[in-house]
Image: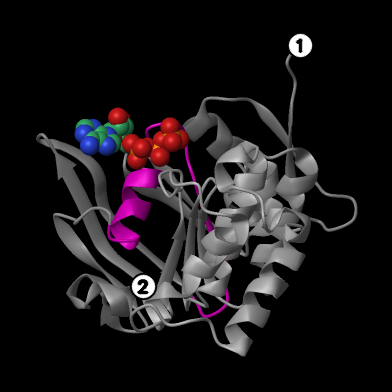
Amino acid sequence: MDLRIDGLGVTIDGRSLVHDLSLDVADGEVVGLVGPNGSGKSTALRCVYRALRPAAGAVRVGGDDITRLPMRRSAQLLAAMTQDGAVDLDFTVEEVVALGRAPHQRGNQALTGRERELCAAAMERLNLTHLARRGILTLSGGERQRVLLARALVQEPRVLVLDEPTNHLDIRHQVEILSHLRGAGPTVLVVLHDLNLAAAACDRLGVLHQGRLVASGTPKDVLTEALVADVFGVRATVVPHPLTGDPQLLYALHS
Ligand SMILES: Nc1ncnc2c1ncn2[C@@H]1O[C@H](COP(=O)(O)OP(=O)(O)OP(=O)(O)O)[C@@H](O)[C@H]1O
């Protein structure tokens, strides 16, 4: 197993925010974490990328407990694209993308030819080449999200974790970013709100409700009308996508 979350628990101010969460992600697999607002998705993910130390349990990458690794080593293994991963300094787009190589470099080394190619390919793939010289602070929210994904990809991590990577994005870029996750190389754990896009983008889903994992499995197994009603409190009709067969939820706002 590439990423193994084992009995994770987070308690803050006496309140259990994540309780006994275990979830495995196999090599190259894309697993989505879904759940209502406040169900503990970001808190769990923060433990995975070491922004938060869990009160219980462990997070293992390739068998190593990442909380016991030096920061530099865990940054070589795991990259995170998060809401709080924004860059406040006015670096250019190409400088921010190149920062993804930092865990692999010693001191202030210049990028090697291979690293420059890697950065150029990531910018090309995320439609950023024309923005390479622009200051990151001048970009729109969606453009900035794409820069942060490019930075995470050039890190060449074994595991990539993403917290709502489609925030701010128009539908074209939502589809594009999510379609980059499969076959991108790394094993992926991604928090998503849109259940239809999660069903299309992920091999498996884990559903969090009040800090507990209440279901996990393929999107087809997990996204049932009963689960959506129980966990999200919403009535939805589940239909197979006519082209892919992925479950898709239809919501009737009026009848
Ligand atoms: N540092 C903290 N101190 C106190 N409560 C916290 C802290 N961090 C998170 N919480 C609470 O823990 C619960 C889970 O929060 P979390 O951000 O993990 O949920 P989420 O599933 O990611 O939600 P959303 O879908 O709204 O982003 C929420 O009720 C939140 O208010």
Label 1 or label 2, whichever comes before in sequence order: 2
Q: Which range is magenta?
A: 26-50
Residue identified by numbered label 2: 75
Work out which residue is located at the far right of the displayed protein and give it: 243
Whole-percent x, y for residue 208 in the image: 41, 45
Residue identified by numbered label 1: 254
**Magenta region includes residue 35:** yes
Classify mark 2: helix, strand or loop: helix
Kind of residue at disc 2: Ala
Depth check: give the residue in front, 120 or 249: 120
Q: Is residue 97 left or right of residue 8?
A: right
Which quadrant of the figure contains the N terminus?
A: bottom left
**Which residue is rendered at x = 26% and y = 72% of the image?**
71
Classify mark 1: helix, strand or loop: loop
How many neighbours does mark 1 have within 10 angstroms: few (below 14), some (14-19), or many (20 or more)? Answer: few
Q: Is residue 203 left or right of residue 56?
A: right
Q: Quadrant of residue 138?
A: top right
Spatial distance from mark 1 to mark 2, Cα to Cα? 48 Å
Which quadrant of the figure contains the C terminus?
A: top right
Between marks 1 and 2 in the image, the one whose residue lies nearer the viewer: 2
User: Which quadrant contains ligand 1?
Assistant: top left
Depth check: give the residue in front, 142 or 191: 142
Work out which residue is located at the far left of the displayed protein and give it: 14
Q: Is residue 242 left or right of residue 119?
A: right
Whole-percent x, y for residue 36 in the image: 47, 33
**Magenta region includes residue 201:** no
Residue 17 visible to the viewer: yes
